[in-house]
Image (cartoon, rainbow, N blue to C red):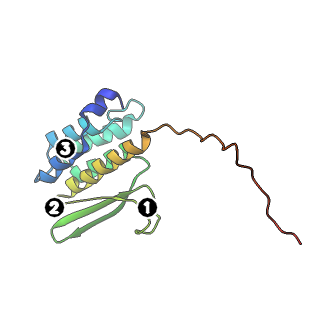
């Protein structure tokens, strides 16, 4: 993602926009793609891009959201989709096979399934960006000159 693209990508603002929307619309979907997607459209992945476009044109919002997640966050998977008391609850995870209590899944909820999926997508996208951009470069610490390894095994 270019620096210019990172400047206009504001996950909290997009998340609020999704939470406050009543239903998914084509302009809202296109705004999400414009602001949060770096692989769309993708020259190297013509078919997945075309699939997302067809789903948007058909207003198949939940399917379009899932296809967009597959294209933009290939290491993430849907962990859970549940409907409870008038809201859809969605969780995305990089480690879906781990037990719930060990997994660092992102979760979102909304009365509209597509908006719940896209809210989780925005959270996962923000997390993926944070992980890929460390704030401090990784440097191996210099060894302590007073440190000397000692073998302390007793074979007797």
**Looking at the figure, which quarter contains the C terminus?**
bottom right
Of residues 13 and 149, the one drawn nearer to the viewer in this rendering: 149
- SS for callout 2: loop
Looking at the rendered image, the disc whose residue lies closer to the viewer, 2 or 3, is 3
What is the secondary structure assignment of the residue under circle 1? loop
Question: Residue at the spot x=24%, y=40% of the render?
Answer: 10
The residues bearing labels 1 and 3 have C-alpha atoms spaced at a distance of 27 Å
Residue 100, percent across and down?
40, 68
Count of numbered tags: 3
Q: Quadrant of residue 44?
A: top left
80 lies above or below 35: below
- Residue nearest the observer in this picture, 18 or 113: 18
The label shown at residue 96 is: 1
Q: Residue furthest front?
A: 146
In space, the residues marked 1 and 2 are separated at their CA atoms by: 24 Å
Q: Are marks 2 and 3 in contact (CB under 8 Å)?
A: no
Q: Which of the marked residues, 1 or 3, is nearer the chain's N terminus? A: 3
Return the residue at label 3: 13
Q: Quadrant of residue 48?
A: top left
Q: Which residue is mark 2?
A: 111
Quadrant placement of the N terminus: top left
User: What residue is drawn where x is 84% and y is 69%?
Assistant: 154
Number of residues whose C-alpha sits closer than 10 Å to that of mark 1, classed few (under 14), some (14–19) or many (20 or more): some
Residue 34 at x, y = what percent?
24, 35
**For residue 30, which quarter of the picture?**
top left
76 above or below 84?
above
Which callout, 1 or 3, points to the residue nearer the camera? 3
In terms of sequence position, does the residue under pointer 2 or pointer 3 come before the other? Answer: 3
Q: Residue at x 47, y 65 (%)?
A: 98
Q: What residue is rendered at 26% in x and 41% in y?
A: 54
């Amino acid at each position: 993602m270019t620096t210019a693209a990172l400047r206009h990508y504001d996950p909290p603002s997009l998340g609020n926009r999704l939470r406050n929307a009543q239903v998914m619309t084509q302009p809202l979907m296109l705004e999400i793609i414009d602001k949060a997607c770096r692989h769309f459209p993708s020259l190297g992945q013509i078919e997945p891009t075309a699939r997302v476009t067809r789903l948007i044109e058909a207003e198949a919002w939940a399917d379009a959201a899932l296809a967009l997640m597959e294209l933009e966050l290939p290491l993430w998977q849907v962990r859970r989709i549940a409907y409870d008391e008038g809201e859809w609850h969605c969780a995305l995870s990089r480690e879906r096979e781990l037990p719930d209590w060990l997994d660092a899944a992102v979760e979102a909820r909304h009365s509209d399934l597509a908006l719940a999926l896209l809210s989780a997508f925005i959270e996962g996208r923000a997390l993926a960006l944070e992980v890929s951009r460390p704030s401090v470069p990784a440097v191996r610490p210099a060894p302590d000159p007073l440190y000397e390894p000692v073998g302390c095994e007793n074979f007797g």
